[in-house]
Image: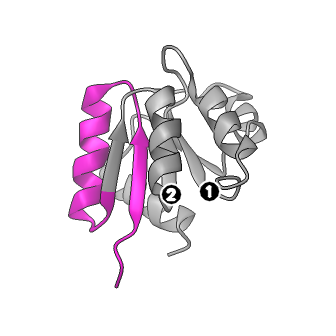
Amino acid sequence: MTMLTILVVDDNRVNLKLATVLLEKAGYTVLAATDGEAGVRLAGEHGPDLVLMDIQMPGIDGFEATRRLRADPAMAKLKIVALTALAMKGDRERILAAGCDGYIAKPFHPAEFLEKVAAALGK
């Protein structure tokens, strides 16, 4: 079985570490980026199976990083799930309209997080 690769893009190092540990324990290969610019670059270099994209980041936010990935024909079909604390009315719709395939709210429960990741990967 080939290990699936997940790119986690989050400027909060605690969230990034938690997601990385959970995903690695679940058997995934994890790539990590602390900003949108690095996330877009890593996605282009590695073609991960899934991108977990924080929305609120300094510089290029998750909306812009997602738009850049969607604009690249080589990455247009990439699965991108928002990983965000944005949970106000309308945020989910804005996130999906920006090109994300799904949404995981922070803070998340580890088991629920892994279930949502597996679902996003079609597992």
Please tell me how many numbered marks the rendered image carries. Answer: 2
The residue that label 1 is drawn on is: 78
Looking at the rendered structure, the kind of residue marked 1 is Leu
Q: Which mark, residue 47?
A: 2
Q: Position of residue 48 (x, y in %)?
A: 47, 58
Q: Position of residue 49 (x, y in %)?
A: 50, 62
Q: Residues within 10 Å of mark 1 (few under 14, many from 20)?
A: many
Relative vertical location of residue 118 with respect to residue 98 in this rendering, above or below: below
Looking at the rendered structure, the kind of residue marked 2 is Gly
Q: Residue at x 60, y 56 (%)?
A: 79
Q: Is residue 105 visible?
A: no
Q: Residue at x 66, y 56 (%)?
A: 74
Q: Are marks 1 and 2 in contact (CB under 8 Å)?
A: yes
Depth check, mark 1 against mark 2: the one in front is: 2
Q: Position of residue 32 (x, y in %)?
A: 34, 41
Q: Residues within 10 Å of mark 2 (few under 14, many from 20)?
A: some
Q: Report the front residue among 46 and 34.
A: 46
Magenta range: 1-29
